[in-house]
Amino acid sequence: MALIHQAQLSPSKAALLGDWVPRQSWIGSADASALEVVGAYRFDDPAGEVGIETHLVRTADGQVVQVPVTYRGAPMPGAEASLITTMQHSVLGERWVYDACVDPVYVSALATAILTGGTEAELQFAAPSERREVTTRVSGSGSPSSAVPVVGAVTCANEGTTTVIATDEIGVRVFRVIDPDQVAALGSHTLEGTWPGRGAPALLAIAYPKEHDEV
């Protein structure tokens, strides 16, 4: 369960996305001159230390881009190149915002959702009056009995509009620019999602054993 605080953020999430996303190689040919946030979903950090949120934004030419980020209360060692910005949060104080694909906490949460048939985190609001309807839903294709490898060191690289994440035992592909017609290979484990304006599930990520280059 993700605890949500009503807070003032500086910079705002929309501002940090608008500044960072257009400069990324994985944006491909999408026109990122203007971005509209259309949805977001969260995963839980079992330790309760790291905020995990994936934003879905629409580009000026109508494509939907997936941007997972993590929010930390202190710098993540060795991840300086993947720091998006620091943010002032009026409740939690200074937060370090990272490209989540380099963050083992995110990769573990994503792999868990994919392999165990998990979903987005339930949202708990610090102020009950701030409760909002959840409009973005995701689900993994696995089963609750599936084993999830421990995620230690993480490396990642961009291949076109996909980010490929490698760990000791599993690989994960995060599709940055969403292709509504893309399908995964038969038997692969997937994460699919819907959001406002998208009623049919779209492929967001896949997970596969490390010995396979891809699925």
Image (cartoon, rainbow, N blue to C red):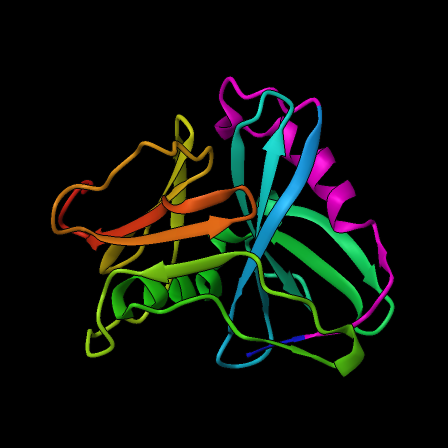
Residue 181 sits in quarter: top left
User: Is residue 138 left or right of 131 when viewed as pictured?
Assistant: left
Residue 65 visible in the current orientation: yes
- State the quadrant of the N terminus: bottom right
User: Is residue 84 left or right of 172 when viewed as pictured?
Assistant: right
Compared to 87, does 112 lie above or below?
A: below
- State the quadrant of the C terminus: top left
Residue lying at 66% horizontally and 43% vertically, measured from the top left: 37
State the extent of the magenta-drawn residues as a range.
4-33
Residue lying at 39% horizontally and 66% vertically, measured from the top left: 108
The image position of residue 27, as x and y in percent, is 53, 27
Residue lying at 73% horizontally and 34% vertically, measured from the top left: 19
Frontmost residue, 185 versus 51? 185
Residue lying at 81% horizontally and 70% vertically, measured from the top left: 6
181 drawn magenta = no
The image position of residue 151, as x and y in percent, is 34, 66
User: Is residue 71 left or right of 109 when viewed as pictured?
Assistant: right
